[in-house]
Amino acid sequence: MSLTEIFSAKGFLFDLNGTMVNDMPYHIKAWHQEIVKLGGTLSLEEMKHQCYGKNDELLERIFPGRFTMEEKIKLGNDKEALYRIEFKPQLKLIDGLAPFLATASERKIQMAIGSAAITENINFVIDNLQISHYFSAIVSANDVQQSKPHPETFLKCAQRLGLSPQECIVFEDTPKGVECALNAGMKAVVILGEHTQSEFASFANVIHYTSDYVKLLVH
Protein backbone atom coordinates (compact mmCIF):
# COMPACT_ATOMS: atom_id res chain seq x y z
CA MET A 1 0.00 0.00 0.00
CA SER A 2 1.33 3.44 -0.93
CA LEU A 3 1.52 6.39 1.45
CA THR A 4 -1.30 8.03 -0.50
CA GLU A 5 -3.46 4.97 0.15
CA ILE A 6 -2.63 5.10 3.86
CA PHE A 7 -3.96 8.64 3.98
CA SER A 8 -7.13 7.52 2.20
CA ALA A 9 -8.23 5.72 5.36
CA LYS A 10 -10.99 7.30 7.40
CA GLY A 11 -9.49 6.41 10.78
CA PHE A 12 -6.05 6.08 12.33
CA LEU A 13 -5.81 4.02 15.53
CA PHE A 14 -2.59 4.39 17.51
CA ASP A 15 -1.08 2.20 20.14
CA LEU A 16 0.79 4.38 22.65
CA ASN A 17 3.93 2.82 24.11
CA GLY A 18 6.62 2.34 21.48
CA THR A 19 4.27 3.63 18.78
CA MET A 20 3.81 7.27 19.75
CA VAL A 21 6.65 7.65 22.26
CA ASN A 22 9.87 5.67 22.59
CA ASP A 23 9.17 4.61 26.15
CA MET A 24 9.23 0.82 25.94
CA PRO A 25 12.78 0.54 27.36
CA TYR A 26 11.53 2.49 30.42
CA HIS A 27 8.52 0.19 30.85
CA ILE A 28 10.71 -2.88 30.45
CA LYS A 29 13.28 -1.56 32.93
CA ALA A 30 10.63 -0.52 35.48
CA TRP A 31 8.90 -3.90 35.28
CA HIS A 32 12.21 -5.73 35.45
CA GLN A 33 13.13 -3.88 38.65
CA GLU A 34 9.76 -4.74 40.20
CA ILE A 35 9.90 -8.39 39.11
CA VAL A 36 13.42 -8.86 40.50
CA LYS A 37 12.35 -7.32 43.82
CA LEU A 38 9.54 -9.88 43.93
CA GLY A 39 12.00 -12.72 43.43
CA GLY A 40 11.54 -13.21 39.70
CA THR A 41 14.45 -14.45 37.59
CA LEU A 42 13.55 -13.08 34.14
CA SER A 43 16.34 -11.42 32.18
CA LEU A 44 15.83 -7.97 30.70
CA GLU A 45 15.44 -9.59 27.25
CA GLU A 46 12.82 -12.03 28.57
CA MET A 47 11.01 -9.12 30.25
CA LYS A 48 10.71 -7.39 26.87
CA HIS A 49 8.55 -10.24 25.58
CA GLN A 50 6.29 -10.15 28.66
CA CYS A 51 5.48 -6.43 28.33
CA TYR A 52 2.04 -6.65 26.79
CA GLY A 53 -1.52 -6.64 28.07
CA LYS A 54 -2.81 -5.39 31.39
CA ASN A 55 -0.55 -5.16 34.42
CA ASP A 56 -2.49 -7.79 36.35
CA GLU A 57 -2.23 -10.17 33.37
CA LEU A 58 1.53 -9.66 33.17
CA LEU A 59 1.95 -10.41 36.86
CA GLU A 60 -0.25 -13.49 36.59
CA ARG A 61 1.83 -14.82 33.67
CA ILE A 62 5.05 -14.47 35.67
CA PHE A 63 3.71 -15.34 39.15
CA PRO A 64 0.63 -17.51 38.53
CA GLY A 65 -1.69 -17.59 41.53
CA ARG A 66 0.67 -15.68 43.82
CA PHE A 67 -1.10 -12.34 44.19
CA THR A 68 -4.65 -11.20 44.78
CA MET A 69 -6.17 -8.74 42.32
CA GLU A 70 -5.75 -5.96 44.89
CA GLU A 71 -2.06 -6.80 45.25
CA LYS A 72 -1.59 -6.90 41.48
CA ILE A 73 -3.23 -3.49 41.11
CA LYS A 74 -0.94 -2.00 43.75
CA LEU A 75 2.18 -3.56 42.24
CA GLY A 76 1.15 -2.33 38.80
CA ASN A 77 0.54 1.19 40.08
CA ASP A 78 3.95 1.19 41.80
CA LYS A 79 5.60 0.22 38.53
CA GLU A 80 3.70 2.89 36.56
CA ALA A 81 4.71 5.59 39.04
CA LEU A 82 8.36 4.55 38.64
CA TYR A 83 8.01 4.62 34.84
CA ARG A 84 6.52 8.14 34.82
CA ILE A 85 9.28 9.52 37.07
CA GLU A 86 12.09 7.99 35.00
CA PHE A 87 10.63 8.71 31.56
CA LYS A 88 9.31 12.25 32.00
CA PRO A 89 12.67 14.00 31.31
CA GLN A 90 12.85 12.08 28.01
CA LEU A 91 9.19 12.50 27.03
CA LYS A 92 8.78 13.38 23.37
CA LEU A 93 6.93 12.09 20.32
CA ILE A 94 8.61 9.68 17.93
CA ASP A 95 10.24 11.62 15.09
CA GLY A 96 7.75 12.96 12.58
CA LEU A 97 4.63 12.11 14.57
CA ALA A 98 3.73 15.74 15.37
CA PRO A 99 3.49 16.80 11.70
CA PHE A 100 1.96 13.42 10.83
CA LEU A 101 -0.89 14.05 13.29
CA ALA A 102 -1.33 17.57 11.96
CA THR A 103 -1.49 16.30 8.37
CA ALA A 104 -4.02 13.61 9.27
CA SER A 105 -6.13 16.18 11.07
CA GLU A 106 -6.04 18.53 8.09
CA ARG A 107 -7.22 15.65 5.91
CA LYS A 108 -10.17 15.04 8.29
CA ILE A 109 -8.95 11.60 9.30
CA GLN A 110 -10.44 10.62 12.64
CA MET A 111 -7.93 9.42 15.23
CA ALA A 112 -8.02 7.34 18.40
CA ILE A 113 -5.61 5.79 20.87
CA GLY A 114 -6.06 2.12 21.69
CA SER A 115 -3.58 1.02 24.32
CA ALA A 116 -3.06 -1.49 27.11
CA ALA A 117 -1.70 1.44 29.13
CA ILE A 118 -3.72 2.66 32.08
CA THR A 119 -5.60 5.94 31.65
CA GLU A 120 -3.11 7.82 33.84
CA ASN A 121 -0.23 6.90 31.53
CA ILE A 122 -2.10 7.91 28.39
CA ASN A 123 -2.99 11.25 29.94
CA PHE A 124 0.61 11.65 31.12
CA VAL A 125 1.75 11.49 27.48
CA ILE A 126 -0.94 13.40 25.61
CA ASP A 127 -1.40 16.14 28.21
CA ASN A 128 2.31 16.83 28.66
CA LEU A 129 2.85 16.84 24.90
CA GLN A 130 -0.36 18.82 24.27
CA ILE A 131 -1.78 16.54 21.59
CA SER A 132 -5.06 15.47 23.19
CA HIS A 133 -7.06 17.60 20.73
CA TYR A 134 -6.18 15.23 17.88
CA PHE A 135 -7.97 12.24 19.40
CA SER A 136 -11.72 11.74 19.32
CA ALA A 137 -11.57 8.50 21.28
CA ILE A 138 -9.27 6.82 23.78
CA VAL A 139 -9.51 3.18 24.82
CA SER A 140 -7.21 2.24 27.70
CA ALA A 141 -6.69 -0.86 29.82
CA ASN A 142 -9.44 0.51 32.06
CA ASP A 143 -11.97 0.30 29.21
CA VAL A 144 -11.67 -3.33 28.11
CA GLN A 145 -12.35 -6.75 29.54
CA GLN A 146 -9.88 -8.53 27.27
CA SER A 147 -6.58 -6.96 26.24
CA LYS A 148 -4.48 -7.43 23.11
CA PRO A 149 -4.26 -9.60 21.07
CA HIS A 150 -8.03 -9.85 21.62
CA PRO A 151 -9.60 -7.33 19.20
CA GLU A 152 -11.73 -5.52 21.81
CA THR A 153 -9.37 -2.53 22.10
CA PHE A 154 -9.32 -1.60 18.42
CA LEU A 155 -12.94 -2.56 17.79
CA LYS A 156 -13.99 -0.18 20.56
CA CYS A 157 -11.82 2.56 19.02
CA ALA A 158 -13.53 2.13 15.65
CA GLN A 159 -16.97 1.99 17.25
CA ARG A 160 -16.35 5.21 19.17
CA LEU A 161 -15.22 6.90 15.95
CA GLY A 162 -18.30 5.63 14.13
CA LEU A 163 -16.18 3.71 11.62
CA SER A 164 -16.03 0.13 10.38
CA PRO A 165 -12.86 -1.89 10.97
CA GLN A 166 -12.12 -1.82 7.25
CA GLU A 167 -12.02 1.99 7.31
CA CYS A 168 -9.25 2.06 9.94
CA ILE A 169 -5.50 1.63 9.88
CA VAL A 170 -3.71 0.64 13.07
CA PHE A 171 -0.25 1.91 14.02
CA GLU A 172 1.55 -0.60 16.24
CA ASP A 173 5.03 -1.62 17.35
CA THR A 174 4.52 -5.12 18.78
CA PRO A 175 3.53 -8.49 17.32
CA LYS A 176 0.70 -8.79 19.87
CA GLY A 177 -0.62 -5.39 18.79
CA VAL A 178 -0.51 -6.31 15.10
CA GLU A 179 -2.25 -9.59 15.95
CA CYS A 180 -4.92 -7.54 17.72
CA ALA A 181 -5.39 -5.46 14.56
CA LEU A 182 -5.61 -8.64 12.47
CA ASN A 183 -8.22 -10.09 14.81
CA ALA A 184 -10.18 -6.85 14.47
CA GLY A 185 -10.08 -7.03 10.66
CA MET A 186 -7.76 -4.03 10.33
CA LYS A 187 -4.60 -3.33 8.36
CA ALA A 188 -1.51 -2.25 10.28
CA VAL A 189 1.53 -0.03 9.89
CA VAL A 190 4.44 -1.26 12.01
CA ILE A 191 6.72 1.19 13.83
CA LEU A 192 9.97 -0.72 14.28
CA GLY A 193 11.70 -0.21 17.60
CA GLU A 194 12.10 -2.96 20.18
CA HIS A 195 11.02 -5.60 17.64
CA THR A 196 12.49 -6.56 14.27
CA GLN A 197 10.63 -6.83 10.97
CA SER A 198 11.07 -10.60 10.93
CA GLU A 199 8.90 -10.89 14.06
CA PHE A 200 5.90 -9.66 12.04
CA ALA A 201 6.41 -11.92 9.01
CA SER A 202 3.39 -14.12 9.77
CA PHE A 203 0.89 -11.23 9.79
CA ALA A 204 -0.79 -10.69 6.43
CA ASN A 205 -2.39 -7.42 7.56
CA VAL A 206 0.91 -5.47 7.74
CA ILE A 207 1.00 -2.94 4.91
CA HIS A 208 4.09 -0.91 5.77
CA TYR A 209 7.16 -0.88 8.01
CA THR A 210 8.94 2.26 9.19
CA SER A 211 11.25 3.36 11.97
CA ASP A 212 9.51 6.73 12.42
CA TYR A 213 6.77 8.94 11.00
CA VAL A 214 9.03 11.18 8.92
CA LYS A 215 8.96 8.54 6.20
CA LEU A 216 5.14 8.45 6.31
CA LEU A 217 4.61 12.11 5.62
CA VAL A 218 3.09 12.86 2.23
CA HIS A 219 5.08 15.59 0.50
Image: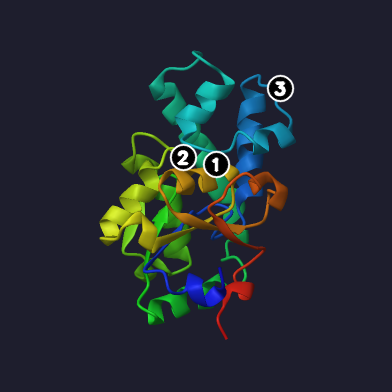
Q: Nearer the viewer, mark 3 or mark 1?
A: 1
Amino acid at circle 3: Thr
Horizontal side of 115 relative to 197 (left or right) equals left
- Residue picked out by circle 2: 148
Position of residue 33 measured from the top left corner of the image (x, y, whole percent): 65, 33
* Residue placed most toward the observer, 14 or 68: 14
Indicate the position of residue 186 as horizontal and vertical percent values.
44, 54
Horizontal and vertical percent for residue 149?
48, 39
Give the Cα distance between marks 3 and 1: 23 Å
- Numbered marks: total: 3
Q: Is residue 140 visible?
A: no
- Assign a secondary structure to mark 2: loop
Among the two numbered marks 2 and 3 on one chain, the one whose residue lies closer to the N terminus? 3
Vertically, is 135 above or below 219?
Answer: above
The residue lying at 66 percent from left, 40 percent from top is: 29
Task: Please state the horizontal and vertical placement of residue 217, each as a whole percent of the image.
Answer: 57, 78
Q: Left of 24 or right of it: where is 15?
A: left
Q: Are marks 1 and 2 in contact (CB under 8 Å)?
A: yes
Q: Can residue 173 be seen in this snapshot?
A: yes
Q: Which residue was labeled with disc 3?
A: 41
Mark 1, other Cα within 10 Å: few <14 / some 14–19 / many ≥20? some
> Distance between the Cα atoms at labels 2 and 3?
25 Å
Question: Where, quadrant-wise, is the C terminus in this rendering?
Answer: bottom right
Q: Which residue is mark 1?
A: 176
Seen from this angle, which residue lies furthest bottom? 219
Kind of residue at badge 1? Lys
